[in-house]
Image (cartoon, rainbow, N blue to C red):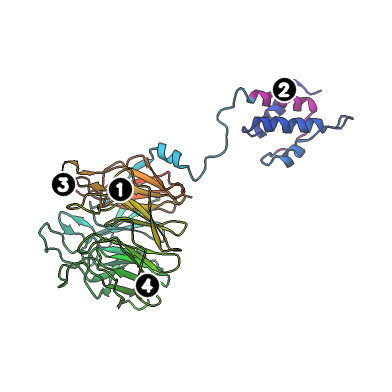
Amino acid sequence: MMDDARTLRLLTEVLDELPTTAPDRLLGSVLDDVQAVPQRGRRPSIRHWRNTHPGARRSKLVPVGLILGVVAVVALLQIVPRTGVGPAASASPSAAAVATAPAWTATGSMVTPREGHTATLLQDGRVLVAGGLVVDTGLASAELYDPRTGSWTATGSLIQGRAWHTATLLQNGTVLVTGGLSTASTTPGADIELASAELYDPRTGSWTAAGSMTEARSGPSVALLPDGRVLVTGGWASTEPFGPKLASSELFDPATGTWTATGSMTERRHGHSATLLPNGTVLVAGGYDSGRSASAELYDPITGTWTYTGSLPEPFLGHSDILLLNGTVLIAGGDVPSGPGAIGSAHAAVYDPDIGTWTATGSMNTARLAHAGTLLPDGRVLVSGGRFNGGRQSATYASVELYDPATRTWTAIADMTAARSGHTATMLPDGHLLVVGGVSDSAGHPLASAELLASTGGS
């Protein structure tokens, strides 16, 4: 018979091997092992138990008496659970876990405060922030955020200062910036829209001219096509003789560095969205011409033509658009369908490209415009910040909420460290969400601050 110390040690080792879940199943399993012992007294081995219970690691022999001792201890586990032991935390937390964990943390501040800028995730994992607006002036400066150090460093400046432009990561790793405003002013008609475009090379940190679009435009919507070309649609041009909203669209070909006009949309649009669908077509939805639009249309890159598709449940303007993992498109928020000025909407809708129709889905908890929408790695959508303009109720938000496509519902989660609208939100390769800049209040004070949300279900 073994001494007490050896028995205790082996008992401890066996307990270490046991999962802490389902004590009833463990008890029955150990009893089965005891019953399987031959009458002549041969000892069952942990090797046998390990072969039938994945996760066990050792193969020492254990006497029947020790097994019976384990039975007693396992029975006690049903009454006094062990603490500090359990399965590893999941890499993709549930919605409830994210909703209860305030995970926003400040990261390094930008060199320059800005709103109306662009943020582009580069192939090496850094984030390029370019242009934007401060004190009614379009910025030419650009800077890089390095997630490994949490720091910002200035990089080459744009050739032309601009705000409310677009930025697209091309297949060769460079970044195409198009259009925007060279200045911004509170005086109507004083803004200068740009036709110029430029390319940023992360290897050299410099910008080079990329020709000019066929039309100057600010606030257009863009989509990177599967063949590497960039489609630019609509936008605002105050010098247009038939109205400032544009129906025209054009293509940039990185192989030749040239711009070419393509088919015009069926409607003039500003404040619309453009989303590349899995079948290679581009969905354009909502926007503004003489009024807020509820129409949507599809661009076919093969024919260069536009065709109407199903109408939205209601007009949308200045909304966020997200291609979901199941191939449908979610749009949310923006301006309300009616009323003076920009107020803010809580409504959302989903487009199904298989049948070409829109369906209203659950509304956000907070009406908002100038917010940011981001697809998380687990398939949910995070909407952050924004503002609501309603006289005495005007406000800029720090609030954040999640949309779950499975339940079609929104859940509020922890607020950002700062209220902001007109900011950017970029998903990093490690699953963190980077939020940058924007305006902090109704007075239009731009922010240099940035922050990270860690619990997004990333890898």
Q: Amino acid at mark 1?
A: Ala
Q: Is residue 276 left or right of residue 158?
A: right
- Residue tagged 1: 346
- Residue tagged 2: 5
- Residue tagged 3: 443
| Mark earlier in primary sequence (1, 2) | 2
Give residue 327's quadrant in the image: bottom left
**Label 2 secondary element:** helix
| Mark earlier in primary sequence (3, 2) | 2
Residue 77 visible at all: yes
- Residue tagged 4: 229
Which SS type dominates the magenta stretch? helix
Residue at 16% of width from left, 44% of height from top? 391
| Mark earlier in primary sequence (3, 4) | 4
Provide the residue span drawn in magenta: 58-76
Residue at 45% of width from left, 52% of height from top? 379
Looking at the picture, tell me which residue is in the foreground, 83 or 238: 238
User: Where is residue 299 drawn, in percent x and y?
Assistant: 36, 71
Give residue 303's quadrant in the image: bottom left
Q: Amino acid at mark 2?
A: Ala
C-alpha span from label 4 to label 2: 74 Å
**Label 4 secondary element:** loop
C-alpha span from label 4 to label 1: 34 Å
